């Protein structure tokens, strides 16, 4: 089309609209779809608000109570005398996350090769490993913790096992994606020079994927410190036990101290891990590829 | 210095770093080992008990009496389905409310859209606290004010969603191209028209994608806030484990895993279609 902007008339616009109607407005069909989608969402939202009691006086009453009782009583944080106990529990939380993440990585490393399309010839094995990983990830940390507390008793071991199980699933997925994205040429080079299967992995695959794997592992460690801080709520060790205990006993000021401690620890770990990851991968502006796999 | 010397020096430096890293790692491992009272023997001893427990989750199901056995396993199926529906609606409502509020706050948390640095800084910190405190802790706090029930759970997940969506949406807002904004302004558009025709088309596909993803995560959250009494199917699961009704727990776990996987697949499909539209916009 050759329309000179200086002489654009109403007729020109009408002609353009006739030629390219969708560039100017949506078709009636699209409009109907649009309104049905948003109308249905609006109606469902209203129904939910009604169903769960947001539209009753109880909600306002609860909100007022939340302001006057909860928020007002959280501050100032107190219970500094219990600090050694809190710090010990925080240390246990971080240690649980560390060992759990490590165990997950160790279990997942060999399985991730089975789960990647370019390393495993047998499609059923590759597909089966992937689905197995999905199954491990499908349950939340707390659900696994609840199961393991029943199986191995109260304490950090149940929490470590919960983290290790979920992380095995997550790492199989992340590692195998890293392996599938590698450059084939280096592996072919090793094969051409007479390298066997193990040597191909050691000199062809690992140098390419290791930085990515380490970075992902650190990121998940960071994430697991957050997860580990709540596992104690079901009795699986860590600071969550103290926190739930204080909240249930209405010792809100002490709970506030614990929450602040957790936030500070999470920030510190995030900062250290971010620094290490930047050293490993280099480009810090790159978006986290693992975001999809995590449940932050 | 010859090439060989340089290369040897480079190798030495690399080895030294690797050694330092390994030593630090071993130190961390040792400290963690002691702090968490980790004992591989207890772990190994626990494994058979775990398997035993997992086996107990599924009652004996015979091939000839398959239907009857299944019916007996899901003897309280109607109640669990009701809980499941409640869980899904909790996640849905928390996603909607959290996304609306988080989306609103994201404009103040985007450096290119916030008018004052102070507003930007405060909004960012508020969002950070909202998402750093785990939703189950928010649930415990809301239970104090609202009592046991789904309302506390919805509010807890909502607060967490506000924090997460606010941050993600703010990043989307910061990455928009200023050219369409200039274009709409140049042809005489006001603030509302700039937002409607220049900003919204750029950010909406990403917003949608993030919202589907958040819905997926919120379904998971909604299944666990029940552990502390904040409604949903987690409550049934927690009670049945506490009362040692393992077959019930197994039945509920199966419902949960099927739902989570189904939602994952659906959400992935929707997200791909949302992003697909983005690349053509």
Image: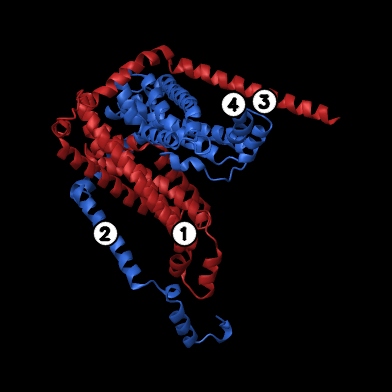
Chain colours: A blue, B red
- Distance between mark 2 and mark 1 Cα atoms: 23 Å
Q: Return the disc, 2 or 4, that comes first in the chain's sequence.
A: 2
Residue A155 percent location from the top left of the image: 35, 19
Q: Which residue is mark 4?
A: A198
What is the chain identity of the residue bearing mark 4? A
Q: Position of residue A184 (x, y in %)?
A: 61, 40
Residue B133 in which image quadrant: top left
The quadrant of the picture occupied by the N terminus of chain A is bottom right
Secondary element type, mark 1 = helix
The residue that appears at 38% across and 28% down in the rendered structure is A78
Residue nearer the viewer, A276 or A253: A276
State the SS at label 3.
Answer: helix
Could you classify mark 4 by the number of other residues whose Cα lies within 10 Å: few (under 14), some (14-19), or many (20 or more)?
few
Taking the spot 23% from the left edge, 48% from the top edge, the residue there is A60
Q: Residue at x 60, y 31 (%)?
A: A206
Mark number, residue B17: 3
What residue did someone put label 2 on? A40
Which quadrant of the rendered structure holds the C terminus of chain A? top left
Dot 1 corresponds to which residue?
B278
C-alpha span from label 2 to label 4:
57 Å
Question: Does residue B43 appear anywhere in the picture?
Answer: yes
Residue A45 x %, y %? 26, 54
């Amino acid at each position: 089309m050759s329309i000179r902007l200086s002489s654009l008339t109403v007729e020109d616009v009408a002609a353009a609209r006739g030629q390219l109607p969708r560039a100017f407005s949506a078709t009636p069909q699209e409009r109907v779809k649009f309104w049905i989608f948003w109308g249905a969402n609006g109606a469902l939202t209203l129904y939910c608000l009604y169903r769960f009691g947001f539209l009753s006086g109880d909600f306002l009453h609860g909100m007022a109570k939340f302001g006057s009782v909860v928020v007002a009583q959280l501050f100032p944080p107190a219970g500094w005398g219990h600090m050694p106990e809190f710090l010990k529990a925080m240390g246990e939380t971080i240690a649980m996350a560390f060992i759990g993440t490590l165990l997950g990585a160790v279990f997942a490393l060999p399985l991730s090769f089975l789960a990647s399309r370019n390393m495993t010839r047998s499609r059923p094995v590759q597909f089966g490993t992937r689905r197995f990983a999905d199954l491990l990830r499908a349950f939340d940390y707390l659900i696994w913790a609840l199961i393991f507390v029943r199986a191995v008793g109260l304490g950090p071991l149940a929490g470590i096992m919960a983290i290790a199980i979920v992380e095995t699933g997550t790492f199989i997925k992340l590692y195998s994606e890293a392996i599938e994205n590698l450059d084939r040429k280096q592996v072919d080079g090793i094969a051409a020079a007479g390298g066997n299967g193990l040597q191909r992995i050691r000199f062809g695959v690992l140098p390419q994927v290791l930085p990515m794997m380490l970075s992902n592992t650190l990121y998940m460690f960071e994430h697991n410190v957050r997860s580990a801080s709540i596992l104690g709520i079901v009795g699986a060790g860590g600071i969550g036990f103290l926190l739930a205990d204080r909240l249930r006993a209405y010792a809100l000021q002490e709970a506030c101290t614990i929450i602040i401690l957790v936030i500070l620890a999470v920030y510190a770990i995030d900062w250290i891990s971010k620094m290490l990851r930047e050293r490993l991968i280099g480009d810090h502006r790159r978006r986290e590829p693992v975001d999809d796999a995590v449940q932050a | 210095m010859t090439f060989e010397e340089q290369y040897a020096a480079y190798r030495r430096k690399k080895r030294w770093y690797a050694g330092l890293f390994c030593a630090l790692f071993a130190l961390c491992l040792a400290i963690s080992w002691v702090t968490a009272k980790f004992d591989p023997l207890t772990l190994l001893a626990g494994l058979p008990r775990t398997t035993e427990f997992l086996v107990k989750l599924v009652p004996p199901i015979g091939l000839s009496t398959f239907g009857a056995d299944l019916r007996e396993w899901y003897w309280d199926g109607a109640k669990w389905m009701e809980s499941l529906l409640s869980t899904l609606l909790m996640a849905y409502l928390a996603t909607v409310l959290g996304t609306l509020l988080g989306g609103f706050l994201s404009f103040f948390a985007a450096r290119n859209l916030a008018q004052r640095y102070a507003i930007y800084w405060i909004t960012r910190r508020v969002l950070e606290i909202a998402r750093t405190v785990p939703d189950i802790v928010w649930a415990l706090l809301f239970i104090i004010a609202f009592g046991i029930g789904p309302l506390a759970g919805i509010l807890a997940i909502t607060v967490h969603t506000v924090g997460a969506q606010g941050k993600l949406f703010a990043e989307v807002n910061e990455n928009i191209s200023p050219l369409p904004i200039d274009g709409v302004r140049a042809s005489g558009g006001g603030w509302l028209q700039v937002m409607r025709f220049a900003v919204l088309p750029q950010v909406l596909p990403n917003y949608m994608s993030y919202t589907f993803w958040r819905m997926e995560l919120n379904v998971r959250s909604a299944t666990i806030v029940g552990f502390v009494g904040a409604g949903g199917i987690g409550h049934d699961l927690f009670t049945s484990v506490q009362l040692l009704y393992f077959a019930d727990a197994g039945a509920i776990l199966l419902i949960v895993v099927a739902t989570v996987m189904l939602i994952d697949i659906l959400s992935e499909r929707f997200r791909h279609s949302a992003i697909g539209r983005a690349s053509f916009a």
